[in-house]
Amino acid sequence: MSAHISATVADGVGHVTLDRPQAINALSYEMVRELTAVFDTWRDDSEVGVVVLDGAGDRGFCAGGDIRELYGYATNGGHGEARDFFRTEYRLDAAIARYPKPVVSIMDGITMGGGIGLSGHASIRVVTERSKLAMPETRIGFTPDVGGTWLLAKAPGELGVHLALNSRTMTAADALYAGFADAYVPSRDLPHLLQALAERADPGSPAEIVMLFDETPAEASTLALARDWIDDCYVAPSVGEIIARLRAHGHPDAATAADELETLSPTAMAVTLESVRRARTLPNLEAALEQEFRAVNWFLGQHDLHEGIRAQVIDKDRDPKWNPPELRDLPRDLGARVLDDPSAGRVFDTPAG
């Protein structure tokens, strides 16, 4: 086991912790492989009745995939290694979703991108007052993956489209409302929750135990309060028309959302919109992951992903130069072309269905 993953078994609880706090537990390829091995080992371990998944440090559960590692793959011709990373990660996300034992994910603090992939498909998903959840991929010229489009597609109304296009950050109350979380537990009570899971009398009742600690967030969901203008505007068939509706709506938050969209990668937004919309028609998480894999494979060779990571993470000048710079310069069928491209191969050995 590496220094970045901690896994212990005690009192029937398998406790696995992402232990890279200096990077907000960002996922490297090595960490994904080791997490896969842990979940595979515990699947048939009679000493493990429930799995708890959390992150070390006080900043967050997981900031996402290791973007610097991805940048290295993308800029040094390592597309094959990058595809291997994503394939392994997606299989892990699906395994957590289908795990035969309850998985309690604790999204305390920042939980984004790959962190959503690990935690958002768990059977019992906990947020705290410190939780900040997002699929922020459009900010780096990329598109939501790790099954994020599956979760976004199931959000009420057009919230999933708004969250995806704008890379919107959710509070705990937002995450509960949008379907990314199941319970709110104040961070002060997390040690007591872990103790209660270890002392449970009924090994089949982790969800009931979590509910004993469940509270109502102090502040209401801002997403819930914004449903009217979000649903009115984000139902439009294209990103350009969404922006036009936001400009015409009159609500100040709608205008702000339009301003945000006009700073982001047109390419990333066009593919993301198509991806989330299509995910609504897919039969299961695995089918969404296959679709995302096709998109990710395409993005690995695109200017905007390289430029977005450079501007946001490498040079940190926050001034990406998108190519093309305007939505009107994109082919109308770009999203369909990308999502229908079979050249990436498959994530799973058998077709999802």
Image (tube, helix red, strand yellow):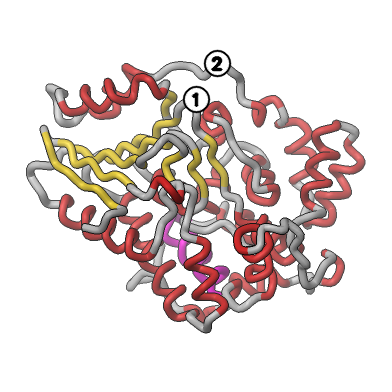
> Disc 2, disc 1: CB below 8 Å?
yes
Which residue lies under the disc numbered 2? Answer: 218
Say whether residue 57 is left or right of residue 245.
left
Quick check: 121 above or below 221? below
The image position of residue 70, as x and y in percent, is 50, 68
> Which residue is depicted at the point 56% across and 35% down?
178
The image position of residue 222, as x and y in percent, is 66, 27
> Which residue is depicted at the point 34% across and 60% down?
32
> Which residue is depicted at the point 25% across and 58% down?
2
**Image quadrant for the C terminus?**
bottom left
- Visible in this render: residue 271? no
Give me the C-alpha separation between circle 2 and circle 1: 8 Å
Quadrant housing residue 305: bottom right
Q: Amino acid at mark 1?
A: Glu
Checking the image for residue 129, the label placed there is 1
- Label 2 element class: loop
Label 1 neighbour load within 10 Å: few <14, some 14-19, many 20+: some
Quick check: 127 above or below 162? above
Q: Amino acid at mark 2?
A: Ala
- Label 1 element class: loop
- Work out whether residue 198 or residue 291 is closer to the camera in this orientation and state it: 198
Say whether residue 95 is left or right of residue 216.
left
- Work out whether residue 250 or residue 57 is closer to the camera in this orientation and state it: 57
Majority SS type along the magenta span: helix
Quick check: 143 above or below 324? above
Q: Which residues are magenta?
A: 283-297
Checking the image for residue 98, the label placed there is none
Magenta stretch: includes residue 287: yes
Count of numbered labels shown in the rendering: 2
**Image quadrant for the N terminus?**
bottom left
